[in-house]
Image: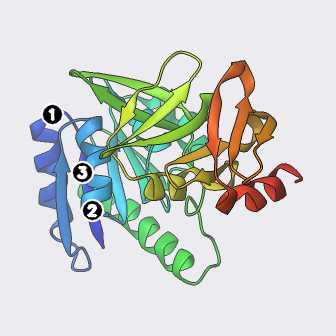
Amino acid sequence: MRVLIVDDERPARDKLRRLLVQETDITAIEEARDGVEALQLAVAFAPDVLFLDIQMPEVGGFDVAASLPSPAPLVVFVTAFDEYAVRAFDACAVDYLLKPYDAERLQRAVQRVRERLSARSAQQAPALAGQPVRQLLVTERGVTRIVRTDDIRWLETADNYVALHTASGSPLLRQTLSALLDSLGSAFIRCHRRAAVRIAAVESMAVDDKGDGELILAGGMRAPLSRQHRAAVMAALAG
């Protein structure tokens, strides 16, 4: 089991690590000091479970949970505040650890994670796996903003980034288009080798004699359409 500890307080991370290393089936542990680092490690480290603090500066635990790549790791929320419990389980948390907790309480949480991972492997209870992300966190010039996937109208590759075209701007996310589409699910479809579109945003289509063209989107935006992808786009639009 691979574990990612996410907490902005070093003593809290140290306590969790000290207790988790005693579990023989935990093979690797990484730590993140904030939500942005957590999302980076969620891709690079590929944990099975996050032990995730809720109240952190800039990017909180619920935003991290909603922005995890698909298939998402399991989440155990760890917090000093009991008022978030209902929201935590609405976010499909495996458990909710209230600080200060003891070793016995943590062991129960780890056992729940084991059971959920076992069920997921057996395809009995996939939990968060396969669910598209609901929002993305984009950091530009030291400022992190939340982009709801429902607000994205189309996607366009830009060197090592993807431009997220929304009504309010086009922030750049450092990711490949293919990987991003995997996490967004069936709401988006590739319409060009360098672009993809949100199906619900398409209002009309303009095609030239060669089969290439444009997709006209809500708000007047236009996305390129290549003949190689036209049939798939038309099938998606037909429902």
Identify the element where label 3 is drawn.
strand
Residue 213 placed where, x, y %?
70, 43
| Residue 227 location, quadrant | bottom right
**23 or 156: which is nearer to us?**
156
Pick out the residue farthest to the right: 238
Label 2, label 1: how far apart the Cα atoms are: 17 Å
Of residue 134 and residue 125, the one placed in the foreground of this image is 134
Q: Label 1: how many residues lie within 10 Å, few (<14), some (14-19) or many (20+)? A: few
Mark 3 sits on what residue? Answer: 5
Point out which mark residue 89 bears.
Answer: none
Q: Which amino acid type is marked by label 3?
A: Ile
Left-right relation of 12 to 202: left
Q: Determine whether label 2 and label 1 are within 8 Å by CB.
A: no
Mark 1, residue position: 9
Q: Judge by depth and name the residue closer to the eye, 10 or 221.
A: 221
Residue that sits furthest to the top in the current view: 168
Q: CA distance from mark 3 to mark 2?
A: 6 Å
The three-letter amino acid code for the residue at tag 1 is: Glu
Q: Quadrant of the C terminus?
A: bottom right
At 36% from the left and 60% from the top, the residue drawn is: 49
Q: Are marks 3 and 2 in contact (CB under 8 Å)?
A: yes
| For residue 3, above or below residue 8 | below
Mark 1 or mark 2, which is nearer the start of the sequence?
2
Quadrant where the N terminus sits is bottom left
Q: Secondary structure at mark 1?
A: loop
From this view, report whether residue 64 is shown above or below residue 128. Answer: above
* Residue that appears at 80% across and 55% down: 236
Q: Amino acid at mark 2?
A: Val
From the top left corner, tell me how far across and down residue 230 is, in percent. Answer: 73, 56
| Picture disc at residue 3 | 2
